[in-house]
Image (cartoon, rainbow, N blue to C red):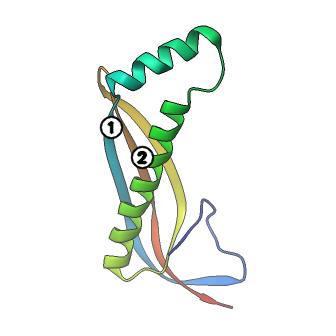
Amino acid sequence: MLIVTSETVANHRIVKTLGLVRGNTVRARHIGKDIMAGLRNIVGGEIHEYAKLISESREQTLDRMAAEAESLGANAIIATRFTTSVMAAGAAELLAVGTAVVIEPE
């Protein structure tokens, strides 16, 4: 499944637009990782625990969005965007949305 943020795919034409697809996940922080992140916050530097959490969340949302697109018969997703929102203290949602399409080489 080709997933792009652009409205078009180079050297391809869109032959069918199948509609909006999305994938999301809600993740909560782990108390142990919060302690490590708090210590790192004191001394500075990248907070690897949170970077890993967000990276895993992003991959899961893309996988879920691609699965929805495949179920519609798409072979690509265009105009992909990410958004986040806080659901509760210590928990956040990551949402990916895009347009499922069928493309073919020009």
Q: Which residue is mark 1?
A: 27
Q: Could you tell me the amino acid type at mark 1?
A: Arg
**Front residue of 54 and 40:** 40
Tell me the element at label 2.
Answer: helix
Q: Residue at x 42, y 46 (%)?
A: 57
Q: Residue at x 42, y 16 (%)?
A: 35
Residue 3 as seen in the image, left or right of residue 33: right
Residue 20 quadrant: bottom left
Residue 75 x/y as whole percent? 48, 81
Residue 64 x/y as whole percent? 35, 61
Tell me the element at label 1.
Answer: strand
Q: Are marks 1 and 2 in contact (CB under 8 Å)?
A: yes
Task: Pick the quarter of the image with the C terminus.
Answer: bottom right
Mark 1 or mark 2, earlier in chain: 1
Q: Residue at x 53, y 36 (%)?
A: 51
Residue 93 x/y as whole percent? 35, 38
Q: Residue at x 40, y 63 (%)?
A: 63
Q: Which residue is mark 2?
A: 57
Work out how far the residue at label 1 is from the one at label 2, CA to CA, in angstroms: 7 Å
The relative height of residue 56 versus residue 79 in the rendered view (above or below) is above
Q: Could you tell me the amino acid type at mark 2?
A: Ser
